[in-house]
């Protein structure tokens, strides 16, 4: 095989690899946009749900200004009992989330070991 033929093949391989790289980068960009959209939708849902519940508790929410509601919430969440209870629940949720992540990582490692131990024939 002469050098120019070998060079042409290598250049063709390089072009193909660059095209695959570009496609992968575009796919990554698309997935990141989807993740952002899902996160935004989840936040919007959470805000609407919690805001609706707060309005339900206020009985006649239309009589209160935003400032009135903010003051009430600052007062309610400023009490020592609520702060302590919030911190306890937050710590519990953090531990649960950490345990779930560790369990998921352990399961993934176990699955990888299983795949590595059983080569595809």
Image: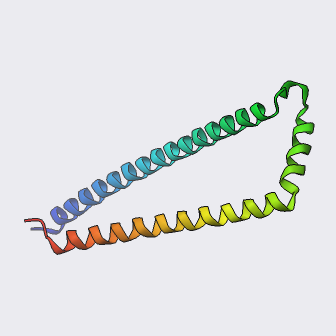
Residue at 64 percent across and 37 percent down: it is: 44
In what quadrant of the picture does the C terminus appear? bottom left
Residue at 88 percent across and 43 percent down: it is: 70
Whole-percent x, y for residue 94 in the image: 60, 65
Residue at 88 percent across and 35 percent down: it is: 66
95 on left or right of 86:
left
Q: Is residue 76 above or below residue 87?
A: above
Judge by depth and name the residue closer to the eye, 42 or 22. 42
Judge by depth and name the residue closer to the eye, 37 or 11. 37
51 on left or right of 113:
right
Whole-percent x, y for residue 10 in the image: 23, 63
29 on left or right of 88:
left
Looking at the image, which residue sits at the far left? 121
Whole-percent x, y for residue 21 in the image: 37, 55
Residue at 34 percent across and 67 percent down: it is: 107
Judge by depth and name the residue closer to the eye, 107 or 30. 107
């Amino acid at each position: 095989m002469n050098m120019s033929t070998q060079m042409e093949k290598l250049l063709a391989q390089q072009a193909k690899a660059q095209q695959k790289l570009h496609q992968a980068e575009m796919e990554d960009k698309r997935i990141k946009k989807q993740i952002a959209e899902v996160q935004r939708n989840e936040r919007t849902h959470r805000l609407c749900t919690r805001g609706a519940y707060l309005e339900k508790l206020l009985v006649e929410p239309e009589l209160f200004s935003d400032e009135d509601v903010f003051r009430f919430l600052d007062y309610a969440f400023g009490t020592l009992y609520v702060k302590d209870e919030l911190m306890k629940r937050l710590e519990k949720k953090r531990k649960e989330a950490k345990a779930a992540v560790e369990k998921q990582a352990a399961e993934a490692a176990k699955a990888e070991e299983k795949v590595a131990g059983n080569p595809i024939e």
